[in-house]
Image (cartoon, rainbow, N blue to C red):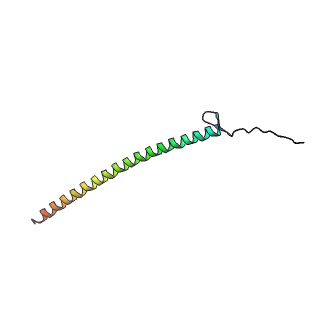
Amino acid sequence: MVELVLCKIYPILYFENSSKRILTESQESLANRKFERDYEVAMESIIEDREKQLTMVSMFYDTVFAVYFLLMNYLTQKIFFLLSFR
């Protein structure tokens, strides 16, 4: 005599808190991939914005330093010129 036991296999389900939905494993995987893709796009956008800001700040400081250097050079020449007549 052979006994046969049949079992139904239920898919793994995930509860989504934000919308109170229950997702299957494939839906959860798809949602995770979409979230990771959107997160990566958002991070790339933020990084690009920060790089632009840093470039602008760097160019500003380079310009300020160049103006400062030229001004100091000009003032030094004027001081030496004025001192040479003493």
- Spot occupied by residue 53 in the image (x, y as percentages of width and height): 37, 47
- Spot occupied by residue 63 in the image (x, y as percentages of width and height): 27, 52
Q: Quadrant of the C terminus?
A: bottom left
Residue depicted at 28% across the width and 53% down the height: 64
Is residue 7 positioned above or below 83 on the image? Answer: above
Is residue 32 positioned above or below 65 on the image? Answer: above
Residue depicted at 58% across the width and 42% down the height: 32
Residue depicted at 11% across the width and 66% down the height: 84
Looking at the image, residue 2 sits to the left or right of residue 77; the answer is right
Q: Residue furthest left?
A: 85
Count of numbered labels shown in the rendering = 0
- Spot occupied by residue 15 in the image (x, y as percentages of width and height): 65, 37
Looking at the image, residue 31 sits to the left or right of residue 72; the answer is right
Q: Nearer the viewer, residue 57 or 19?
A: 19
- Spot occupied by residue 65 in the image (x, y as percentages of width and height): 28, 56
Q: Quadrant of the N terminus?
A: top right
Looking at the image, residue 21 sits to the left or right of residue 4; the answer is left
Residue depicted at 54% across the width and 40% down the height: 34
Is residue 27 positioned above or below 47 on the image? Answer: above
Q: Nearer the viewer, residue 19 or 79?
A: 19
Q: Residue furthest front?
A: 1
Q: Nearer the viewer, residue 64 or 29?
A: 29
